Image: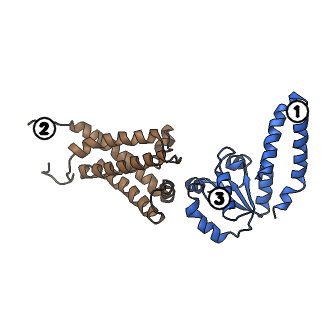
Chain colours: A blue, B brown
Amino acid sequence: MPLHIKSGKPLRRKLFTTVIILLSSISPSLSQLHAAASVALAKEESGELDLSATKALFDTHSACFVDARSEYVYYKSHITGAISLSDSRFEEQFPDFRHNKAIETLIVVYCKEPSCGMARHVAKKLMKNGYRNVRVFSGGLIEWAHAGFPMEG
Amino acid sequence: MTKIGFPSALITALRLMLGVLFIMSGYEKLMDLKFFALIIAEYQILPTFLISAIALLFSLCELLCGTMLLIDLFSRFSSSVMLCMMVIFIAAMINNVMRGLDHDCGCFKFLSQWYGLKEEIGIVPVVRDILFFILLLPIASFGSNRVPWKKDQK
């Protein structure tokens, strides 16, 4: 299932970012683009999703959304249909999650914002526990809310 | 031996102020008990099966003790109960700060909404709870243990 994300548009984006990086080494005026492109490339390689890719998965119901923030924050607001699997209480919540979600399920983990780090921790823990199709929505709930996408809580 | 007195007007003022504060805090927690229980869970101190019961117990204690302080019913007893709760809150927060955990303290949400006080665990809520502890001490030591509607009581 996650194959359709990796092919097509993202491949073109990868090519584009590579070209930008090469050009920026010649022209200093492109150094800002260089930095942004490097970040984008790093995100792609680490399996992180941007807002549009995440929304596409949300619309097609092809992924299980996991909220890595604390449960009390999740309780107040979260992406519609997301499940709470907090970084802080992962061990307590995981058995229930494991019982309900098959190992091959595509999982999108998010937290508050790109710098929060909890989503990456939870993604790593999920992969350690056998889940292979785990992606991180790095923009987090703030980017999702700013875009006016569905939320509940 | 001379007995050290404490101005009764001051005791009354403290009683009324803390009474209102604890009533509001307890009421707020009872209105969204699940949210309070989830915050208690975040402290990672209690076993999961106890969390809901403790959330209910703490909220009810705050509401009842606050009411008792406000109407001066067994003030000494109710302030002693609140002193014990303050010690528990302070110890739990210090424990979590030392473990490097970062979450809401579940103390007085309305204060943070009204005055922008910090609700996350840290030095500010600890100092605030120590202040409440100090303010409760005179009531627990010099307050009355009377029933307001019964006459001829000391």
Q: Can marks 3 and 2 be said to lie on one chain?
A: no
Q: CA distance from mark 3 to mark 2?
A: 63 Å
Question: Looking at the rendered structure, which numbered label has been put on residue B3?
Answer: 2
Mark 3 is surrounded, within 10 Å at the Cα level, by few (under 14), some (14 to 19) or many (20 or more) other residues, namely some
Mark 1 is surrounded, within 10 Å at the Cα level, by few (under 14), some (14 to 19) or many (20 or more) other residues, namely few
* Chain to which the residue tagged by mark 1 belongs: A
Q: Quadrant of the C terminus of chain A?
A: bottom right
Q: CA distance from mark 3 to mark 1?
A: 38 Å
**Camera-side residue: B19 or A112?**
A112
Question: Looking at the rendered structure, which numbered label has been put on residue A25?
Answer: 1
At which x and y percent is residue A64? 71, 63
Q: Which one is in front in this view, the residue at disc 3 or the one at disc 2?
A: 3
Callout 2: helix, strand or loop? loop
Callout 3: helix, strand or loop? helix
Name which residue type carries label 2: Lys
**Camera-side residue: A129 or A70?**
A129
- The residue sitting at the left extreme is B1
Question: Looking at the rendered structure, which numbered label has been put on residue A125?
Answer: 3
Residue B2 shows in the view = yes
Name which residue type carries label 1: Ser
Q: Can marks 3 and 1 be said to lie on one chain?
A: yes
